Image (cartoon, helix red, strand yellow):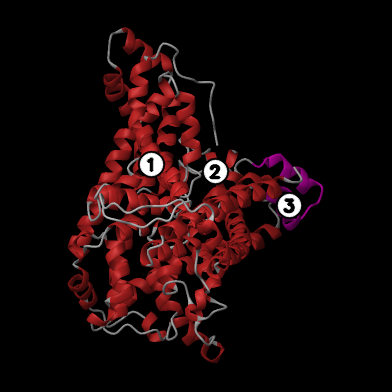
Amino acid sequence: MTLSHTNGPGRRGTSRIGALFAAPYVLFVLAVFAVPLGYTVWISFHRFYFTAPGAGVDSPWVGLSNYRDVFTDPVVGRAFLNILIFLVINVPLTVGLSLVLAAALNAKLPFRSFFRAAYYVPYVTASVALVAVWAFLFGSDGLVNHALGGLAPDPSWLVNTHLAMPMIAFFVTWKQLGFFVMLYLAALQNVSRELYEAAAVDGAGSVRRFFSITVPGVRPATTLVLIYAIITGANLFSEPYLLTGGGGPDHASVSPVLLMYQKGIEQGHPDFAAALGIVLMVFVLAVSLLARKISERGD
Amino acid sequence: MSTPTTESATPAPATRETPSPTTGRARTGRILQLTVLSLGAVAFLFPFYYMVVGSLKKTTTGDVSGALPGGFTTANYRAINGAISLGRSLLNSGIVTGGVLLCTLVFGVLAGYALAQLTFRGRGTVFATLLLVQTIPFQLLMLPLYALVVRNYGLGDSYLGMILPFAINSTAVFLFRQFFLQLPASLFEAARIDGASELRILWTIALPMARPALLTGVLLTFIGPWNEFLWPFLVTKNTDMQPLAVSLAGFLSNLQGTVANPTGALLAGACVLALPAVALFLVFQRHFTHTNIDSGVKG
């Protein structure tokens, strides 16, 4: 991120009015982030039920009991495994495809703005709308199966234990790819042109130049792809809920957030869901730090 | 929000071309590039084409004939309108999105201006919080927010309840701050010496100059609440209050039996949901792709 301190604020700017201007945002952050975060931690250590306001139901302290339930629930394990499957498919595909597309778009080409628009359109479109088309494309009687004929998987894509989660990973990769193409396109502007020229003089072919100059040159963008992929994986809800009908066969595509919804709201165990939320948050932080370490190694 | 957002106000440098040596190999390379880009564009646009064609068919089938144009009817649009009262859903989507945009612009500009051009106690803390908040996945806080907003504040089935968690977009605050930082402090000093109030300076000097940043802020903010599914899905029980993404998902899950051509009706609804965001994107494509994406890369 660009943090410019050089062109800072005037020293004589009035101080009280500044705090007043920032106050609505501060209140918003307190109300929407800080208080709910604290409340989640509190709920996760208590036996908690949703009640109407004013209904005097006790919420006794239960220590780590909710966390024990989370760690012993096999579906929770499945949900985290599903995020890992998601990442294993999404990250290499996103990095590979968006880098190749961005490198191709970076040259002077006819129809360049058309191509850019084409890749960006799924990104700005609602998941719910796109899920409807994918369900139609990959349904058991859908176009893909008609095209494949006897090669169509049985059971079909979205109701198949082995294919449900990969389908979600492919869907999300497709939907978000345009964003990352633009990200890499911007990153390519920062790669030194002289390096390409020097390499060309030294006789390096275009493939060699791509791997020796382009790939390391856009490393900060790749780190960002990793972080975004992890956050997206942690946030998955609409796709497993709608595309694979509430989490797929045998929870094959259930996600932690979907599980939080099912346990917390459908089945009335918000305390379990709160503990799961905290575990998920720690998981996201840990994997993000790890990803940052890995992608920055070798610098 | 489940989609990664972009951040920055600094305009991207004009696209630089990768040098292409003028050999015979260059032409092969260019044909290869165009082929890769065209194949990509087909993969990205075909689902949209299929969505539109499917929404206009009398009977929408998954076989190859379903992908060919012809035999068009508007019956599906009338069917989805009857099943989920399209007008009302669109109105709800519009009110929620409009409310989010208004709050983001008003409070976001105030906070961004304060962070960039005014000094006040705690400014550093507010800015650090701003950066932190952008990395916290919203879905993780959904249960405590649900408990607070719906159960404690009684805002279920209300526009305010749907707007609240998105009321101020942190990315937009960051964007406005970056923009106001670029304006010279001396510009504001002169007005202050003349005795103008900060609000007046903001309104008459800073805002007119900030129009490009405001436009980017609107574009960035629009697709979030318009496409959002999970939060309004939690908050609304009453179908009269549901935004289009939620009522369409409701149709997908349990109303398909009520119409003659359910797939066609679903795709018609998907077209209506997709159209505003896609249209806005195509009209303002330059702003989407050029102004707001690169700062994250320079990490």
Mark 3 vs mark 2: tell me if same chain.
no
Q: Are the two marked residues, 1 and 2, in contact with CB atoms closer than 8 angstroms? A: no
Give the dominant element type of the magenta stretch: helix, strand or loop: helix
Q: Secondary structure at mark 3?
A: helix
Chain ID of residue with mark 3: A
User: At x 53% / y 23%, what residue is drawn?
Assistant: A5
Chain ID of residue with mark 1: B
Report the residue marked by disc 1.
Answer: B169
Mark 3 vs mark 1: tell me if same chain.
no
Report the residue marked by disc 3.
Answer: A209
Q: Give above or below for A39 relative to A208.
A: above
Return the mark for residue B15.
2
Query: Mark 1 packing: few (<14 Cα in 10 Å), some, or many (20+)?
Result: many
Expressed as whole percent of the image width and height from the top left, the position of residue A95 reads 61, 57
Between residues B199 and A265, which one lies in front from this camera angle? Answer: A265
User: At x 73% / y 54%, what residue is drawn?
Assistant: A211
User: At x 43% / y 54%, what residue is drawn?
Assistant: B139
Between residues A253 and A297, which one lies in front from this camera angle? Answer: A253
Q: Give above or below for A274 relative to A77.
A: above
Expressed as whole percent of the image width and height from the top left, the position of residue A52 reads 26, 54
Quadrant location, the C terminus of chain B: top right
Q: Secondary structure at mark 1?
A: loop
Which residues fall within the magenta stretch? A191-216
Quote the CA–CA distance across marks 1 and 2: 29 Å
Q: Give above or below for B170 relative to B189.
A: below
Mark 1 vs mark 2: tell me if same chain.
yes
Chain ID of residue with mark 2: B
Question: Does residue B253 appear anywhere in the picture?
Answer: yes
